[in-house]
Image (cartoon, rainbow, N blue to C red):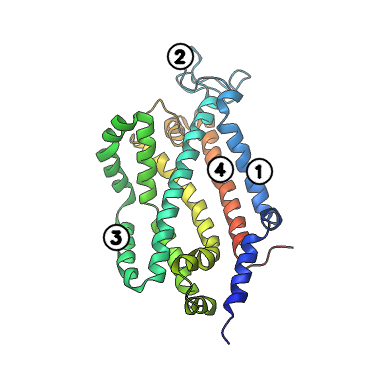
């Protein structure tokens, strides 16, 4: 028996319209992950007000200082306050992760939906995806950074130019997994009776995608988003380690870990604190993404 499109559409829209506080709030992962991510953001972004110490201020007479009231996380070899540097680095790392994730998610979702719905474009788009997957990611990023770094730095300024370049480079080299996941979901969905009935009723492609396709692929997209943030932060760390990220005097979590690697056995806290910040940020976003994916999936009932 053909599944009535009206019943299926009603189920989808009921999920979308259900108050978010009631449906999403029922998932503990959203609450725990959201609270943890909010605490990190509240500590990182207004960090200059919470801990008004210049993260680039050098005090050679106070280098390699242990934790104290004046320097809760100690200082590095140049006497720079580690707490101030961790807070300042978080602003850049989180911003790069979120922005690059949005770029990758947008490109991957569009390509995945188009490839899944269009037989004519499916082959070329998937071959393009395979081409990007076959390219070595790190060498490709290095080439992009070397080609456009100077031009964007001169046009937008050193920091803004590097931010745009890193976000763009990481985003356009990270969309392939999302595209494949979305395409697979769309291929499965378009064979469902409610999608066929909607097409038979003359529903436009735009309405079909917005009202029937995207609500049903929200769950894998959210999971892909969480992985994208983690991947972007780690990729930025690798670029900083190779000297092609932000300048050495511009702290990021990746830069802090890289700079402290040679002091790992003598001063392990220098690696531990920025590494812990990266881990907690990725963990909180992953919890939120998994729970939001379940909550926004119309095929799953909300937890009781």
The residue indicated by pointer 1 is: 35
Of all residues shown, which one is farthest toward the front? 202
Foreground: 198 or 57?
Answer: 198
Left or right placement of residue 131 versus residue 43 in this view: left
**Does dot 1 land on a helix, a strand or a loop?**
helix
Q: Residues within 10 Å of mark 1 (few under 14, many from 20)?
A: some
Which quadrant does the N terminus fall into? bottom right
Q: Is residue 4 above or below residue 155?
A: below
- Alpha-carbon span between mark 2 and mark 3: 50 Å
Q: Are marks 1 and 2 in contact (CB under 8 Å)?
A: no
Measuring from the top left, give residue 295's x and y in whole percent: 63, 60
Secondary structure of residue under mark 2: helix
Please report whichever mark, 3 or 1, sits nearer to the chain's N-terminal start.
1
Q: Which residue, given by chain and number where applicable, does mark 3 sit on?
A: 131
Q: Which residue is mark 4?
A: 281
Tell me the CA gap for discs 1 and 2: 38 Å
């Amino acid at each position: 028996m053909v599944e009535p499109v009206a019943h299926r559409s009603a189920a989808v829209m009921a999920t979308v319209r259900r108050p978010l506080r009631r449906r999403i709030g029922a998932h503990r992962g959203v609450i725990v992950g959201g609270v943890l991510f909010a605490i990190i953001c509240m500590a990182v972004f207004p960090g200059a007000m919470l801990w008004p110490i210049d993260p680039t201020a050098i005090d050679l007479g106070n280098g390699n200082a242990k934790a104290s009231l004046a320097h809760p996380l100690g200082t590095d070899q140049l006497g720079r306050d580690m707490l101030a540097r961790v807070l300042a680095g978080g602003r850049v790392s989180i911003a790069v992760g979120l922005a690059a994730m949005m770029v990758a998610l947008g490109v991957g979702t569009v390509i995945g939906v188009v490839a899944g719905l269009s037989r004519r474009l499916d082959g070329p788009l998937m071959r393009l995806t395979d081409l990007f997957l076959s390219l070595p990611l790190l060498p490709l990023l290095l080439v992009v950074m070397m080609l456009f770094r100077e031009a964007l730095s001169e046009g937008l300024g050193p920091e803004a130019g590097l931010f745009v370049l890193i976000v763009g480079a990481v985003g356009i080299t990270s969309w392939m997994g999302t595209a494949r996941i979305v395409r697979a979901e769309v291929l499965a969905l378009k064979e469902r009776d409610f999608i066929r009935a909607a097409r038979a009723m003359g529903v436009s492609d735009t309405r079909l995608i917005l009202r029937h396709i995207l609500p049903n692929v929200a769950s894998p997209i959210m999971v892909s988003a969480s992985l994208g943030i983690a991947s972007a932060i780690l990729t930025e760390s690798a670029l900083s380690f190779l000297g092609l990220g932000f300048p050495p005097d511009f702290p990021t979590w990746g830069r802090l870990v890289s700079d402290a690697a040679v002091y790992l056995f003598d001063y392990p806290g220098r690696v531990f604190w920025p590494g812990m910040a990266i881990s907690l940020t990725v963990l909180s976003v992953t919890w939120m993404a998994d729970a939001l994916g379940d909550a926004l999936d119309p095929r799953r009932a909300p937890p009781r």
